[in-house]
Image (tube, grey):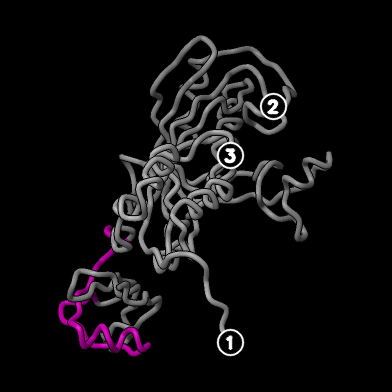
Amino acid sequence: MARRRRGRPVSGILLLDKPMGVSSNGVLQRVRHMFNAQKAGHTGSLDPLATGMLPICFGEATKLSAYLLDADKRYEVTAALGASTSTADAEGEITGRAAVNPQAFAQSTSQFVGDIEQIPPMYSAVKHHGQRLYELARAGETVERKRRRVTIHSIEVIAVTESSVSLDVRCSKGTYIRTLVEDIAKAAGSLAHVASLRRTQAGPFGGDMVTIDTIQSLSEEGSDPLDALLLPAVTALRDWPMVHVNQESAFFLRQGQAVQVSKAPSAGTVAIIGPQEDLIGIGEILDDGRVGPRRVLAAVR
């Protein structure tokens, strides 16, 4: 007999403003508890030091988490100049000092726009022989890490002081902002670490976010005010090519069958929209022109 899930069958996406000092998983579990939701997942971890955009998917929307994880991100970061730390951010111990030159740091940012390679920091969740790097780092170990290619779409200098430089960074998934700050400082002939980090955009989601305090306050009024905070799953794919299907085609797609759709693209992956403007799922254009289901969402009542 199947084990019954505890909680409500909540479905949708919450744009959480993650607070400083807690892990992404820790805040996820807290929010899930306040919503009393059966199922929830986030779309890409933020360091405990970091704040900002952490989309949380509930119910059927969790099927889209992987696609949001692959999406581009945007950050505001302040680099503290003249010192490196063991964690490359303000939480670590100082490991080196160097002369401070804000202008050289700011000028060096242009070297890092485009496709670049990064070495993941030891304090990261990357696995080495089945063990997280941060676990090895806490045990005092340092291991060789493979370089990873990422894309920095843009870097804008937004503030310069005598001891810091603040940047607006648009980048691909998998970019380590801590490593970027260290590498820019190295190119400028100095040292630096992340003093503060805030994610302002994840994929299609930017702008207004909901704080933990707001969720806590609304939870005391019942489930309806909480559910009003949720965006429909379709908003996660609003930048994708879309095809619209009728009720009959939606039924067959949810049964795993490909369907013919008028005005569909000739190739690629598409968001499939139902007759109620609901998200049926993610589809792929087949060789014969039909739309085949790739990831299907159950109808939300």
Does residue 90 appear left or right of residue 115 in this picture?
Answer: right
Q: Position of residue 56 (x, y in %)?
A: 44, 54
* Tag 3 secondary structure: loop
Q: Is residue 2 visible?
A: yes
* Tag 2 secondary structure: strand
**Is residue 118 or residue 34 the one in the foreground?**
34
Q: Can you say whether 27 is above or below 67 in the image? A: above
- Residue position for label 1: 1
Task: Answer whether residue 238 is magenta in the image.
Answer: yes
Q: Position of residue 145 (x, y in %)?
A: 71, 49
Tag 3: Cα neighbours inside 10 Å, few (<14), some, or many (≥20)? Answer: some
CB atoms of marks 2 and 3 within 8 Å? no
- Which region of the structure is painted magenta? 237-265
Q: Amino acid at mark 3?
A: Val
| Marked residue nearer the N-terminal end (1 or 3) | 1
Q: Position of residue 170 (x, y in %)?
A: 41, 40
- Residue position for label 2: 85
- Residue position for label 3: 22
* Tag 1 secondary structure: loop
Tag 1: Cα neighbours inside 10 Å, few (<14), some, or many (≥20)? Answer: few
Q: Which residue: 36% across, 81% down?
A: 293
CB atoms of marks 2 and 1 within 8 Å? no
Structural distance between the alpha carbons of marks 1 and 3: 37 Å
**Is residue 97 or residue 242 the one in the foreground?**
242
In which quadrant of the rendered image does the N terminus lie? bottom right
Q: Position of residue 212 (x, y in %)?
A: 45, 40
Q: Amino acid at mark 1?
A: Met
Does residue 294 appear left or right of residue 84 in this picture?
Answer: left
Task: Answer whether residue 90 is magenta in the image.
Answer: no
